[in-house]
Image (cartoon, rainbow, N blue to C red):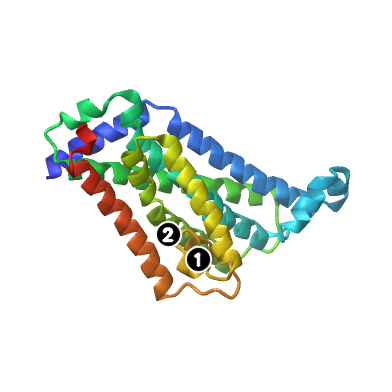
Amino acid sequence: MTTGYRAALAAELLKARRSKMPLLTFLVMAAAGGVAGLFMFVLSDPEQARRMGLLDQKAQLSGLTADWAGLLGFLAQIVAVGGLFVYAFIAVWVFGQEFTSGTLRYLLALPVPRRTIVLAKFTVTAVWCAAVTLWLAAVVLLVGLALDLPGASAALLRDGLARTAAAAALMLLVTTPAALVVCAARSHLAALAATVGALVLAQVAATLGHGDLFPWSVPAVAAGLAPGTALGPAALAVVFLTAAAGVLGTTRWWQSGHAGN
């Protein structure tokens, strides 16, 4: 099992290393961090904001403040909302690239159980998502230092980064169904369309005050973006059940023989 897992993991890592997709996701996260910096700059310089026209209004409507609390809140918001699409994109690429590149038959030729291949793919997905999230956090922190934002404290940084980490972990769990969709449909577009649908429904659930019961809204609750809604046992149960459905469903699809058809 250990040798087979290492072989499958090495194959997945090699595929990712030879692709430009990791670089693309890091650039997307860097851009998101840049947007956070732009908002902070606009809010911290009202005169400049007025010269920029509508950008001032958009920044004010965001409800952010030009300090470390506002910046860390924006970081959590990026992960809790935009993270769904980025994480799902990574999962879809890791599990779906075999169908578009024609490498599936080579992967299945490895003397490795198919469940082990699935485990290796989920491992690469998790590590990749964690890496881009750490990169985003580093970019945002550098932005805060560069803008010399007020209100920094060890407790604030600890709380803000903890909320971001919780949102990221929960978001990673609820993106596992994207792997199942891309495998079952053999289509990147189908999986990404399902992700967009989940994102829309998550916003609706949060607006109706039931964000703690809809799996793709729970990360926002953990990030503190749903005032008055607590992250309780029911919310965690919904997340873990969704994650289990995605992982077990994907594993069963691979073991059922559909992967080789």
- Residue at 25% x, 32% y is 11
Give the quarter of the figure containing the N terminus. top left
- The amino acid on which the numbered mark 2 sits, given as a three-letter code, is Leu
Q: Position of residue 129 (x, y in %)?
A: 42, 46
Label 2 packing within 10 angstroms: few (<14), some (14-19), many (20+): many
Q: Label 2 to label 1, Cα distance in Å?
A: 8 Å
- Residue at 41% x, 48% y is 130
Asked which secondary structure carries label 1, the reply is helix
Q: Is residue 115 left or right of residue 244?
A: left
- The amino acid on which the numbered mark 1 sits, given as a three-letter code, is Ala
Q: Nearer the viewer, residue 145 or 100?
A: 100
Q: Mark 2 or mark 1, which has the lower sequence index?
A: 2
Q: Is residue 106 visible?
A: yes
Q: Specify the quadrant of the image occupied by residue 234.
A: bottom left
Asked which secondary structure carries label 2, the reply is helix
Q: Position of residue 190 (x, y in %)?
A: 43, 39
Which residue is the site of mark 1? 222
- Residue at 70% x, 56% y is 149
Q: Nearer the viewer, residue 72 or 167?
A: 167
Q: Is residue 240 left or right of residue 83?
A: left
Q: Position of residue 67 (x, y in %)?
A: 70, 59
Which residue is the site of mark 2? 170
Q: Taking 213 as reference, is 196 above or below it?
A: above
